[in-house]
Image (cartoon, helix red, strand yellow):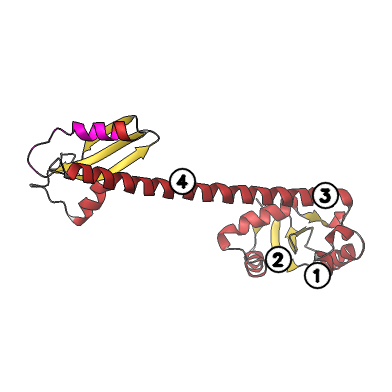
Amino acid sequence: MPRLTRHGEKRLNERVGTHRTDSGKIAKRAYKHGIHHSETTGELKSWLSGKYFLRRTATQMRIFQGFLYVFAEGTLITVYPLPERFADNLEYYVEPAAYEAYSEYLYQREIEKESAATVKKDKIFQQRKTEFHNRVMLEDIRQFAAERYDVDITSVITEGKKITICYIPRGSSIPDMTEIWWHVRMDTYYTSVRLKHVRDLNGKPMYRYRNIPSKDEYECVYSC
């Protein structure tokens, strides 16, 4: 990965608008996939030559996404905005093969970004869908249990066709909750139903009448 001088990083963040944490990645992309001085033609090549003679340490220059990145032996020195007359008509100032490779890279990057955004959106959607479904299931099971058992249904955990129902007895004994098992097994698509007695932070089964957890413990226990 190219190194960055403090000045180079500052100019990159100011002019390109990148965040400091992304500076290295952007510089690397520009260095690896940007258009070289030797691949330019005409007025653009003359403009780049002028930059070189102005700063002879600029041994490596790259044009990338509307900016000129000036490197010296792999270290980013500074960044300049590319004049509009070049940025808007770059194809006419770059050798065909080099421009084609550059354009192909940018196209692939855009496809990857769109794909990543789609995957992220789908992941968020699926997560929200699961959370909503779990809330519906939790309320259904709570209502079913409230009419039959002296227990608190604290949460449900679903994974595929498996469901775990977490509970805390209100009394000193654990009731037979076979009806809940049958209710979920027969009236939903879950093929694996597990009833889990919630335990405290010390691993002991909790009973509501003798163990009222603190706020922190409550959050920890009910995160299951």
- Mark number for residue 84? 1
Q: Amino acid at mark 2?
A: Thr
Q: Residue furthest top?
A: 191
Q: Closer to the N terminus: mark 4 or mark 1?
A: 1
Q: Label 3: state its secondary structure.
A: helix
Mark 4 or 1: in front is 4
Mark 1 or 2: in front is 1
**Residue that numbered label 4 is attached to:** 126
Q: Closer to the N terminus: mark 2 or mark 4?
A: 2
Q: Position of residue 115 (x, y in %)?
A: 61, 47
Q: Label 4: state its secondary structure.
A: helix
Q: Is residue 196 left or right of residue 6?
A: left
Q: Amino acid at mark 4?
A: Gln
For the residues bearing labels 2 and 4, Cβ distance under 8 angstroms = no
**Residue that numbered label 3 is attached to:** 100
Q: Is residue 122 magenta?
A: no
Can residue 19 be seen here? The reply is: yes
